[in-house]
Image (tube, rainbow, N blue to C red):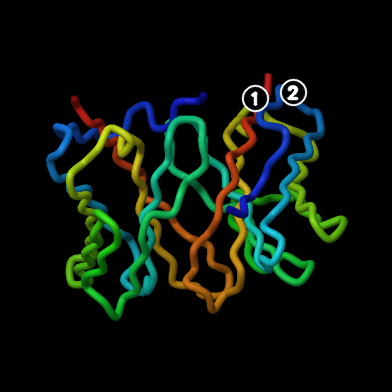
Amino acid sequence: EPEVTQTPSHQVTQMGQEVILRCVPISNHLYFYWYRQILGQKVEFLVSFYNNEISEKSEIFDDQFSVERPDGSNFTLKIRSTKLEDSAMYFCASIQDASSTGELFFGEGSRLTVL
Amino acid sequence: GESVGLHLPTLSVQEGDNSIINCAYSNSASDYFIWYKQESGKGPQFIIDIRSNMDKRQGQRVTVLLNKTVKHLSLQIAATQPGDSAVYFCAETWDNYGQNFVFGPGTRLSVLP
């Protein structure tokens, strides 16, 4: 069964450092997403990406965040200067197209710990 | 793995019983809803979806009911099994293009032997 893969599974970093989280969406999917989940809280939308540009972003996704699709397979989330409150699970998701059933396929997540 | 939702409401059911998990959604304009299952340390997993032009949809052992009048969604799991133990989230969206779903806070289902 096709799946969304994410690396690293866990990253520990110092406050102020840059972090890049990587995702390989399902190969024939066209829409890509990043969500985050702070421990004990609900899953929150960060950003959606289609046709090599951001289509939607939330208030959380400020100037410290950026996304990129550097090649045909990877989709990355960069946090430029991490803060303590960026500690969370970050989930990548993809969907085939907007007219499909809407089923988002999630990766297993990358746990970011900022010290 | 990481524990998700340490302070979530918990529903405990006996193995073999039926489970009903409820969700109140926020936006009356939402037209598409999904139930997700999240096991500890894993990403959300799609269970079943429903569009706003329906009030009931059935899958394998699961049924979703939608009451638009009171903005309420429920997930019924028949003959609950130990493998059903997880956190269950409802998600809503009103934006077909961005697909930026809004997730509910989740309910932890604990299946007792």
Q: Residue at x 45, y 31 (%)?
A: B40
Is A46 placed above or below A29 here? Answer: above
Residue A78 rendering spot, x and y as whole percentages = 77, 44
User: Residue B14 falls in which quadrant of the image?
Assistant: top left
Give the residue pinned by disc 1: A113
Q: Are marks 1 and 2 in contact (CB under 8 Å)?
A: yes
Q: Residue at x 87, y 58 (%)?
A: A71
Do the dots labelled 1 and 2 sit on one chain? yes
Is A91 placed above or below B46 here? Answer: above
Residue A112 rendering spot, x and y as whole percentages = 65, 30
Give the residue pinned by disc 2: A13
Residue flagged by tag 1: what amino acid is it? Answer: Thr
User: Residue A111 falls in which quadrant of the image?
Assistant: top right
Badge 1 or badge 2: first in the primary sequence: 2
Tag 2's secondary structure? strand
Q: Indicate the quadrant containing the C terminus of chain A: top left, top right, bottom left or bottom right.
A: top right
Q: Is residue A81 left or right of residue B9?
A: right
Real-space Cα separation, disc 1 to disc 2, in angstroms: 6 Å
Residue A103 rendering spot, x and y as whole percentages = 49, 63
Tag 1's secondary structure? strand
Q: Residue at x 57, y 43 (%)?
A: A36
Q: Residue furthest right?
A: A71
Residue flagged by tag 2: what amino acid is it? Answer: Thr
